[in-house]
Image: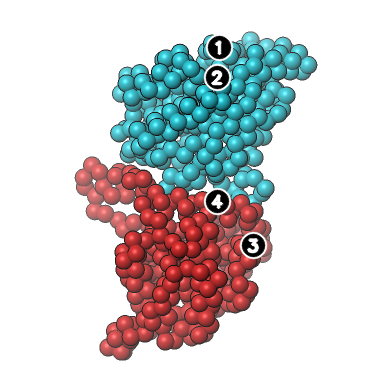
Amino acid sequence: MQFKTALAQINPVLGEVKKNREIHLKFIEDAIKEKAELIVFPELSITGYYLRDLAMEVALPSFSNFFEPIFRKSKEIDIVLGFVEKGRDSNIYNSAMYISDGSPKMVYRKIYLPTHGMFEEQRFMARGDRVEAFDTKFGKVALLICRDLFHPSLVLLTFAAGADIVIVPSNMPIRGLDGEKSAIERTVENAVAIYTNFFGNFVIYVNRVGFDDGLGFFGGSFIGTPTGNKLGYAGTFEECLTSSIIDTEEIFKKRQLFPLAREEDLNIVANNFKRIMEEKNG
Amino acid sequence: MVNLSLNYSLVKKFIVHFIREEVRSNKFEKVVIGLSGGLDSALVAFLSVEALGNENVINILLPYKLSAPESLEHAMLIKDILKTPYEIIDISDIADEYIERTPDMDRIRVGNLLSRIRMSILFDKARANDALVMGTSNKSEIMLGYTTWYGDMASGLYPIGDLYKTQIFELSKFMELPEPIISKAPSADLWPGQTDEGELGDTYISLDSILSLYIDERKTPEEIIKMGFDETLVQNVIRRVITTQFKRTLPPVAKFSMRTLGMDFLYPHDLNK
């Protein structure tokens, strides 16, 4: 099937959830006008990134009334956004949710929270522990968040779960300004090129722009296709909305022409993995 | 030597966005820059004009009677090129009032005093103009601690604080700053004949190579010396970095409560965006 996907490369206001909800509604409205059927926002799009002690103050349950105006819009367009989730277990999570037809269909909790150098996510938030693919009108979708994408093990799990499309809301700060593109942007593009080529899937990468306390987010959002194309590249540093057509038939074609998916034997992977872990754990 | 080259087109774009957004998220439209006639403040002025427009960049020129005459000439040249509002305040009377009553002052103390008088005036002008004070410190001097604590270090933003001096030269060439300002010897100009490289003991390219290896690549002193750098120079550079760490941190608090400045009261700087 073919459907139009909008990448909302926004610059959220740190800690101002109501202002950010307005930004979301405006971009959603624009995406609907462009006849997009799916819009993806960056990681923590409702809250901003460098929250530190603010994290607990801006946390919201996924079913909060706060999201009602956005839930209503999801009758016209599917929406992925990022927020600090106030869990029923009284932990807070760096989460993203897939909203469709008036309610959240799936809430994903970021698993790998970078906590080193300039990153301190696990100082303030708890980590998730579950990767899954779920049915949408566009096929099976899995969510990963930012750093998760740099763990091939998690991308393998999305493949094992049958995801056709992996959606990756991100907040990646720029670093490495010695090349034509920043080093971090090159890393993302290389990773996505490898994943989409070998797994024969789509990866929708949406990164924010703007600054939190001098951390500069570069944007560079795009959709990686199974045939190695880059769709909807949003450029760097500027807020924008780019829309492009995803044709899921590309997955079928790629997996027939280069049948890595047919060769893949997840039982062999699982059995070996289990044995290796048993040996490791004594 | 170490390859410190950058994509200066990308660096410029990034810093211009940084200035535009951080000035506004600090709730200002305007900035105040202490324009010394040297390269760092000239570069910050160029970047700020690009980010905010010339009418929002207020250049303050603060000469002392012993400043090199070319410093004021070069500062005038920059404000003329950029067509920014400016003000000249000669600090000789203010400084001498104290210096003449304090006969034992050595030149380091005088230099620190001049730097902190300039800081006081810049912050006053910022208040008067509802503007933010722009920092003009670069990564080399910040890391070497070659700077006056609460003097030239005091500011609201450090737009060039992650660029080594070697990279400041290159970005300045890329942005076509006036040649005489790029090619003159870098100097704090706190006393006649002072130069950075004279005081720091080697060229910036050597100093920056050692800093980059030690700070960015986390090489040990032994590894750096093995690469062919002078042992005494390496030790001096690293000693400078280590002994000036206090300038780059908040002062320690006698902590006893549950939430304390700098330790567990951890709101972002851009809290009130």
Does the CB distance between marks 1 and 2 fall below 8 Å? yes
Q: In the figure, A179 relative to B76: above or below? A: above
Chain of residue at mark 1 = A
Estimate the spatial distance between the alpha carbons at disc 3 and disc 1, rounded to whole Å. Answer: 51 Å
Alpha-carbon neighbours of circle 4 within 10 Å: few (<14), some, or many (≥20)? Answer: some
Amino acid carrying label 2: it is Glu
Does the CB distance between marks 4 and 3 fall below 8 Å? no
Chain of residue at mark 2 = A
Lateral position of residue A174 relative to residue A64, left or right: right
Chain of residue at mark 4 = B
Dot 4: what SS?
A: helix
Q: In the figure, A134 relative to A240: above or below? A: above
Q: Name the residue under label 4.
A: B14
Q: Can residue B199 be seen in this view?
A: no
In the rendered structure, find residue B174 and report the number of the disc placed on it: 3
Dot 1: what SS?
A: loop
In the rendered structure, find residue A137 and report the number of the disc placed on it: 1
Quadrant including the N terminus of chain A: top right
Question: Closer to the camera: disc 1 or disc 2?
Answer: 2
**Coloring applied to the structure:** by chain
Mark 1 and mark 2 lie on one chain; the one further toward the N terminus is: 2
Instruction: Tell me what hue chain A is rendered in.
Output: cyan
Amino acid carrying label 4: it is Phe
Question: Closer to the camera: disc 4 or disc 2?
Answer: 2
Instruction: Tell me what hue chain B is rendered in.
Output: red
Estimate the spatial distance between the alpha carbons at disc 3 and disc 2, rounded to whole Å. Answer: 44 Å
Estimate the spatial distance between the alpha carbons at disc 4 and disc 1, rounded to whole Å. Answer: 39 Å
Q: Mark 2 points at which residue?
A: A37
Alpha-carbon neighbours of circle 3 within 10 Å: few (<14), some, or many (≥20)? Answer: few
Q: Position of residue A230 (x, y in %)?
A: 67, 31
Q: Is residue A80 visible?
A: yes
